[in-house]
Image: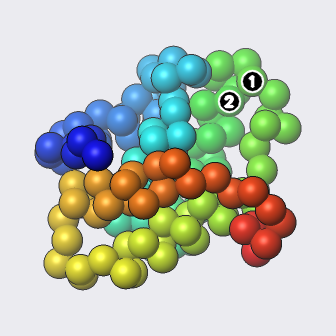
Amino acid sequence: MTVPYQNVQEIEAVVAGFEACTTPKDGFTHLSHLTVATFYLHTSTPELAFEKMRVGLFRFLDHHAVDRSKYNERVTRAWLQQIQNVIEQSDSASSLVSLTNIVLERLGTFRLTSNKDYE
């Protein structure tokens, strides 16, 4: 797999595009979700990361005129937990770039498929 990120600025650009809603609706991919969530978990507590993700997703949906029913709190929490698990299994001295690339490698093609994934 090609290393998606070479530096922190690339990650920050994805986060900034999400937060400012300058990323097109179709441009906010699964990998973008993982990138933003990893950034939030790396820079804050899990609960604050969840809150930032929730608020950001609602803002993004509203900006792009997407029905809020597309958002699922249990799925958001489950993804954050999956990402947190990867972070905890990684070297504690890993940089944000390294952690984000590891998360994308491990979870980039993973899909939550059953209710047990949401618990």
Q: Is residue 54 above or below residue 117?
A: above
Label 2 secondary element: helix
Q: Is residue 82 above or below residue 22?
A: below
Distance from Cα at disc 1 to Cα at disc 2: 5 Å
Callout 2: few (<14), some (14-19), or many (20+) C-alpha neighbours within 10 Å? Answer: some
Image-based side of 10 in relation to 41, left or right: left
The quadrant of the image that shows the C terminus is: bottom right
Residue at x-position 29% and y-position 34%? 13
* CB under 8 Å between discs 1 and 2: yes
Q: From where the camera sits, is residue 1 visible?
A: yes
Q: Which residue is mark 2?
A: 61
Residue at x-position 66% and y-position 64%? 77
Q: For this rendering, which residue is in front, 44 or 4?
A: 4
* Disc with the residue nearer the chain's start (1 vs 2): 2
Q: Position of residue 75 (x, y in %)?
A: 72, 57
Q: Is residue 44 above or below residue 52?
A: below
Q: How many marks?
A: 2
Residue at x-position 57% and y-position 71%? 81
Label 1 sits on what residue type? Val
Image-based side of 15 in relation to 108, left or right: left
Callout 1: few (<14), some (14-19), or many (20+) C-alpha neighbours within 10 Å? Answer: few
Q: Which mark is residue 66?
A: 1
Q: Position of residue 117 (x, y in %)?
A: 72, 68
Q: Position of residue 40 (x, y in %)?
A: 42, 58
Label 1 secondary element: loop
Q: Position of residue 18 (x, y in %)?
A: 47, 34
Label 2 sits on what residue type? Leu
Image-based side of 88 in relation to 51, left or right: left
Q: Looking at the image, what colour scheme do you see?
A: rainbow
